[in-house]
Image (cartoon, rainbow, N blue to C red):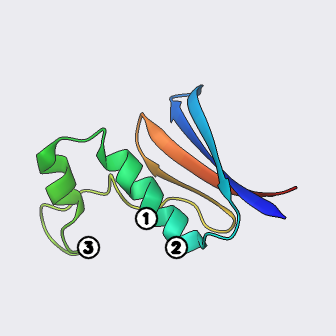
Amino acid sequence: MAQWIISKYDSLELLQEWRIPGNISAGQIEELLKRLASRDLTEMEVINSSLRKNSRDRINLLDRKGTGPEMHVGENPYYLAHREQL
């Protein structure tokens, strides 16, 4: 059995942690991280983060960082997710 662990950090300080069933896909977890991170942004930051990658005004505040089993989204605070086997 597996589970996802989602952690909210501000710099190196752990602010909160959630455990989610492991049957959720990595794509769904990535989307969840983006939703959580968007709560800490202004409306204009959300709009600019949602533009096409080649757009002049685009910023990467909602882009996934990390490859493989661990991913994070956001910048102080940021949200980190990894899958753990029980």
Residue occupying image coordinates x 37% and y 47%: 37
Q: Identity of the amino acid at label 1?
A: Glu
Q: Are marks 3 and 1 in contact (CB under 8 Å)?
A: no
Instruction: Relative to 41, say whether 64 is above or below.
Output: below
Q: Earlier in the sequence, mark 3 or mark 1?
A: 1
Would residue 14 appear left or right of 69 to someone viewing this image? left
Mark 3 closeness class: few <14, some 14–19, many ≥20 residues within 10 Å = few
- Calculate the distance from the C-alpha at mark 1 to the C-alpha at mark 2: 6 Å
Q: Which residue is identified by label 1?
A: 31
Mark 2 closeness class: few <14, some 14–19, many ≥20 residues within 10 Å = few
Q: Residue 1: horizontal and vertical position, in percent?
A: 84, 64
Report the disc number at residue 44: none
> Circle 2 — which element?
helix
- Calculate the distance from the C-alpha at mark 3 to the C-alpha at mark 2: 19 Å
* Quarter occupied by residue 56: bottom left
Q: Identity of the amino acid at label 3?
A: Lys
Report the disc number at residue 27: 2
Q: Identity of the amino acid at label 2?
A: Gly
Q: Residue 49: horizontal and vertical position, in percent?
A: 24, 59
Q: Earlier in the sequence, mark 3 or mark 2?
A: 2
Nearer to us: label 3 or label 2: 2
Report the disc number at residue 53: 3
Q: Residue 76: horizontal and vertical position, in percent?
A: 42, 34
Would residue 24 appear left or right of 63 to someone viewing this image? right
Residue occupying image coordinates x 19% and y 62%: 58
Residue occupying image coordinates x 45% and y 58%: 32
Tell me the quadrant of the picture where the C terminus can be found: bottom right
> Circle 1 — which element?
helix
